Image (spheres, helix red, strand yellow):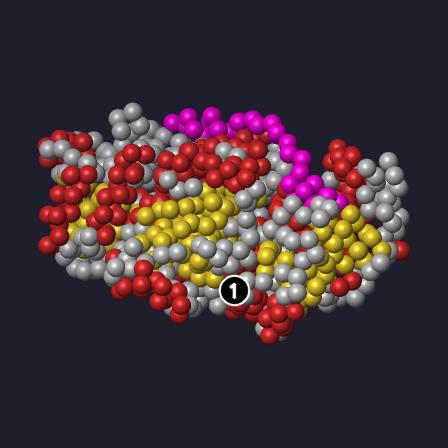
Amino acid sequence: MSDSIPEASPSHASVPTDPSVYREMGLTDGEYAQIREILGRRPTYTEIGMYAVMWSEHCGYKYSRPILRLFSTYRAAADSGAMENAGVIPIGDGLGVVFKMESHNHPSAVEPFQGAATGVGGILRDIFTMGARPIASMDSLRFGDLADRRTRFLFNGVVEGIAWYGNCVGVPTVGGEVWFHPSYEGNPLVNAMAVGLVRTDQIATAAAQGVGNPILLVGSSTGRDGIHACSVLASAEISEESLANRPAVQAGDPFTEKLLIEATLEALASGHILGIQDMGAAGITCATCETAAKGSVGMTIDVLKVPRREDGMTPYEVMLSESQERMLACVKKGREDEVAAIFHKWGLNAVQVGEVTDDGFVTVMEGEAQVARVPAKSLADECPTYTLETSEPSYISSVQNYDLSDLPEPADLTEVLRRLLASPNIASKAWVWEQYDHMVGTNTVVLPGSDAAVLRIKPLDAEATLTHRARAADPAAAERKGIALTTDCNSRYCYLDPYQGAWLAVAEAARNLSCAGAEPRGVTDCLNFGNPEKPEAFWQFRRAVEGLAAACDAFGTPVVSGNVSFYNETPASAIHPTPTVGMVGILDDVERRCLSMFQNEGDHLLLLGPLAPSGDAPLDGIGGSEYLSVIHNLEVGRPPRLDVERERAVQATLRRLIKAGLLRSAHDCSEGGLAVALVESAVRGGWGATVHLPMITGEASPEEDAARATAVSATWQLFAEAQSRVLVSVAPDHLEAVERILREAGVPFAALGTVGGENITVSGRRFAGGADAETLVELPLAEAKTIWETGVSRWMR
């Protein structure tokens, strides 16, 4: 092999021969040997750094990529070279929704405020890089026990970071979820999702093209923040060393991001930009090699031309910096001054740093000195992949086969409900979302706190407004289209059974959208797991992806974008497997949306879905439940079963009823079961409710139903988390029509009672063959409201 290319900087001129150099960057001996084989020589220091970041799991997906091929849309895009920064689903009238979710877990563990803030900024850039205007963001957050002081520090910092960045950049944060569990102690999960709107004929690509076309770096200046954040910080377990690694965390500037959004969209509208890429993980290295590889071209850049905010930066530092709010654009030759003028108008850098070549190499210069020259595709597309060992964790058998039949029945069901309402996993998350500006842009029509966020879709500009109206038979109706968004995952279910837990995450997300009246259309995911090099963790990952792939196929919601986050563990433990699902649905008319809260006194309450567990699984819905965890301090059993056909029937019928204007409210029964859903709808609506158990249903004779229902304990009826169940309220004059449609659709349902009063009152038999009906729960609405609303906020005072 020939000698390496010397670097111009004297401090990096020598050829690194000590294996510790590349090992510290995250490369293995075998990978270093493969790099030498590709180059036909020893790599320079800068080249080692470039390969280290691009061949990390965070960028190269060297462990996860073979498993991700289980997703049909991912497989097709990878095989065709159609991978882009985010996914797109068409919504009609020439418009598409662009959306994606990504993690910023390890940066948030090290520096929660900036870690979370830059997570929001990064996912927004993935959206407007596609030419889409960002219209909303959401987040899915996981933390340890709120009784722990550091957990509260992380929780507070993350929420403040999300609020600061989102509020300042002017993109509403419209919802999300928060979950607490000891497994996230020291390793929080911060999964950020963003959504944008684009004309489907104007979607921007990341491919560079046209030999001789100039390459512009636009946006902020480059500093030393974020160097090796993806290859070292994000691709290793959390430790004392990483917690001290604050310089690796990027610093965000939402005001610059807002300018960058407007400048980028204006520049794209000029038609002079041929390809554009966000500088996220791996910075300039990622942007250059990926745009060149995607366009099957090469690229030469000069690091001396890169605007910097720090003196003395080496080529290695410039190429690996993950400074925020930067983009790389391939521009039509002769139009570079016009494009630069647009960014300058917005007060941003726009500097030509290189040009497109025809040799397929990314060549990095420092003035006249060549410091790196590597094949673009070797960095972007040829990261080595590994088939890792899998092994079912030893705990699986014991927790799944745990005998729950001897659980003691609680004597005071009202006290059980109080304790569940106080659980941070169930309690109101208003302390979080009240810090977010969820109304900026005036598109939000369902605020945080309901089953799903709903946004009105407005035309992108005046010209689009005219086109939009002209295409529609009913111009007024053309402007009533909307989208619904949700993020979901019950990681306790995934711990007990990753395959079934992933299935249930997709089902719940689709159910939440259906409760709003939206038809589920597409999924983005954020796959959070422990160390993949441990067979047990990789088994959890594989089984979860298999479950997600099967569920998305079953519900017709393809995975169009996503992210994998491994190494989420501390020396104490790994996180619970957390395959977070972000889902987007479409409403033809946002005026027909449905909310989760009770609306009027005297409305009738119905429960849609299964009314009792099947005979061979009498405790279905108790295993893995919040009831079992809070009341019995157990995390065992099997996750709830899912009858896919029944789930689809419930959701389709629910959407039909909402579209017809026949429901006053609809709320998914999830954590805490029917009792919690009842209180949440009551507290949010300001009305109490009177409910009677057992239930008389529309699927059999009253005598048969009464016999079935009394064979189930009130504890199961109230607190089990059986799937496919939705609590709805119906105006008296619509009750007959609703019941008729439910019977026609074959959807089981039960008449529960009515809305009204100042208490939550539940009566019925406690056990099979028990005494006459009694009052099972009696809870003043005011007390329920106080418990539920302070379950999180009381810890954060």
Q: What's the residue type where badge 1 is placed? A: Ala
Above-or-below relation of 480 to 370: below
Please give the residue where the numbered disc 1 appears in the rendered image: 269
Q: Nearer the viewer, residue 20 or 464?
A: 464
Question: Which region is colored magenta?
Answer: 374-403
Specify whether residue 550 is painted magenta. no
Q: Identify which residue, 779 or 519, lies in the foreground.
A: 519
Looking at the picture, does residue 309 appear above or below residue 394?
Answer: below
Res 571 seen here: no
Q: Say which of 164 and 760 sits in front.
A: 164
Q: Is 379 in the magenta?
A: yes
Sort mark 1 into few (<14), some (14-19) or many (20+) by Cα contacts within 10 Å. Answer: few
Q: Is residue 797 above or below residue 548?
A: below
Q: Residue at x 58, y 37 (%)?
A: 65
Question: Residue 196 location, x and y as percent?
Answer: 46, 58
Asked if 59 appears above or below 38 in the picture, the reply is: below
Residue located 10% across and 54% down the image: 733
Q: Residue at x 44, y 67 (%)?
A: 437
